[in-house]
Image: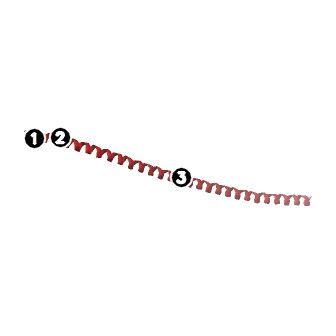
Amino acid sequence: MEEVIKRIVNAEKEAEARIEAAKAEAKKIIEQAKSEAKLIEEEIIREANLQGEKLVEDARLEGEGEAKKIIEGGETEIEEMKVKATQNFENAVSVAIQLVRGS
């Protein structure tokens, strides 16, 4: 009977030792997972920042292109207005000359 009790006690001690080893292993695995998660988080943040910077740069370039188109359109419109003004002036001078000659 004593031998059975010793075996039970030893089995309990072994079980406790295994439990403690499993706890230590679980703690190590958790720490490693946290470390890996932190690295993944940093990589995701880095990628998001790069994508954000690219979006901002793309928007800036698009805005510059639109501004250039507007300026070019405005310059074209101004040039057209100059031509019309010149034509109107020439017509006015022509009419004035006819009036002077006709008088």
> Which residue type does callout 3 highlight?
Glu
The residue that mark 3 highlights is: 53
> Which residue type does callout 1 highlight?
Val
Q: Nearer the viewer, mark 3 or mark 2?
A: 2
Residue 12: numbered disc = 2
Residue 38: numbered disc = none
Which of marks 2 and 3 precedes in the sequence? 2
Element class at badge 1: helix
Neighbourhood count class around disc 1 (C-alpha, 10 Å): few under 14, some 14–19, many 20 upward: few
> Which residue type does callout 2 highlight?
Glu
Q: Nearer the viewer, residue 27 or 11?
A: 11
The residue that mark 1 highlights is: 4
The Cα atoms of the two marked residues, 1 and 2, are separated by 12 Å
Residue 80 falls left or right of residue 64: right
Q: In which quarter of the image is the C terminus?
A: bottom right
Query: At which x and y percent is residue 42?
Result: 45, 49
Residue 7 falls left or right of residue 34: left
Which of marks 1 and 3 precedes in the sequence? 1
